[in-house]
Image: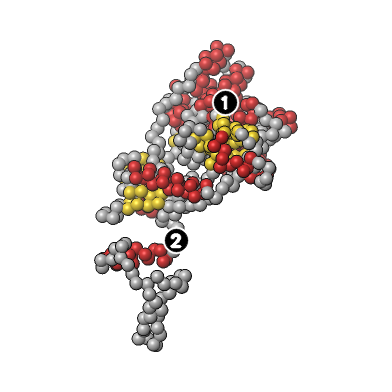
Amino acid sequence: MRVYSADNQLIGEFGEERRSFTRIHEVPQLMKQAILSAEDERFYQHSGVDYVGVLRAAVGNLVSGHARSGASTITMQVARNFFLSSEKTFSRKFNEALLAFKIEHTLSKDQILELYFNQIYLGQRAYGFAAAAQAYYGKSLNQLTVSEMAMLAGLPKAPSAYNPIVNPARAKLRQQYVLRRMRELNFITADQYEVARNEPLKLARPTMDVSQPGQYVAEMVRQAMYERYKDAAYTQGFRVFTTLDSEHQRWAYDALRAGLIDYDRKQGYRGPESFVDVAGMEGDEQAEALDDALSEIRDSGDMQAAIVLSAKPSEVRAYMRGGRVAVIKGSGLDFARRSLGGRVSANQQLRRGAVIRVRANAKGYWEIVQMPEVEGAFVSVDPRTGAVRALVGGFDFNRSGFNHVVQAWRQPGSTFKPFIYSAGIERGITPATFINDAPLTVPSDVGGQKWEPKNDDGKFA
């Protein structure tokens, strides 16, 4: 289901999971080998848990001092994707291993690989490698080159971090790793490796994407369509047109965010959003850890998430998605300067590993900003027709889907004002009309009680 503005701009999509179920015997041998090289080279030898891999991961984690490798086999990933959550706890890992043994006892290796091949999420709404081949390259599996197969095989570890559309530099590094593993395992020849390693990245043209900040309206439409059509709303390919004006919607979105940011900025900088442990990490290991951490944090408009690499009173360097480094100096530090000193608590200090928000200002320089805690809403309606021209239900739909326009309760007094004002305007009262605010007593016929209206402050004007 796609939701559009009145002027045909896409504001939302629902119910779309790109899937293309493929039998394992239809998968090219090189595609299977690329997956095994990246995820589980001993898949056909172990019984669900690779003890050699567990030992290797344990030694690697011990040497590095960080839990960077979990030694999950393909069977364990199938167990997690179908039956468990992705929380990183010992109990989940234990249940994952038990389920892996059960799956291995019940299904053949090819059946397990087929489940993995078609179920794993690979970014761009694509589930399974056949769907991913279409999403990224616009090709079927049989048309992929070795280079493209290696790129797709590198995605399961972190689809957002290694997405070649969003993060081409990081995706290329992951692809090179998979190609090296394929060569080491003799799945490809030296000539194939050299050709694949040097093949330029050629992606398919991106599919239509949401181009307007209308998520709150899109969600209102989704609820209305589901109420009327139930599950068919997601499967019948509906195109829903709203009364929104895309220009008005953009202005409303920008104005609301600017107002809330300006208000929040006056309250001062609260400190980093969280912290990531990167002690002792350098080079590719550090970049991989930072990309993994950033993959779990959504950007908000032009406010981008970044992780501090170094912090001095004169300069802060912060790592951003794709390996970019934002260097913040001078006035870009003004808002958060207090957090660069030693007079704040540890959780407010800007130091290595701190997760912050940065954006490029009007002059193109980076500055430190923060997500406002205050919320707000904006709605504009055509008084002649009642058509909603713009509606923004909050600062960021991804942070909170609560729609402050239609879901928040109003103060009864403020809600009633339009009716009072309308009655006054109907009788000729204007904003320039003076009203006598002298003390007043209104007699009552019921019980002889008198009514005396009073102002909040007890004063009269």
**Dot 2 crowding, Cα within 10 Å, few <14, some 14–19, many 20+:** few
Q: Nearer the viewer, residue 153 or 247?
A: 247
Q: Nearer the viewer, mark 2 or mark 1?
A: 2
Which residue bears the numbered disc 2? 409
Q: Is residue 287 visible?
A: yes
Kindly indicate the quadrant of the structure image that contains residue 19.
top left
Circle 1 residue: 174
Image disc number at residue 296 = none
Q: Nearer the viewer, residue 317 or 177?
A: 317
| Residue at horizontal 48 percent and vertical 36 percent from the top | 361
Amino acid residing under circle 2: Trp
What's the coloring here? secondary structure
- Which one is earlier in the sequence, the residue at label 2 or at label 1? 1
- What's the residue at 40%, 27% (across, down)? 205
Disc 2 to disc 1, C-alpha distance? 49 Å
Residue 82 in view here: no
Q: Is residue 341 left or right of residue 14?
A: right
Q: Nearer the viewer, residue 191 or 174?
A: 174
Question: x, y (%) of residue 131?
Answer: 46, 32
Q: Is residue 34 above or below residue 451?
A: above
- Tag 1: amino acid: Arg
Q: Could you say whether the residue bearing mark 2 is in a helix, strand or loop?
A: loop
Residue at image position (48%, 52%) is 375
In the rendered image of this protein, does residue 205 appear above or below residue 232?
A: above
Mark 1 secondary-structure assignment: helix
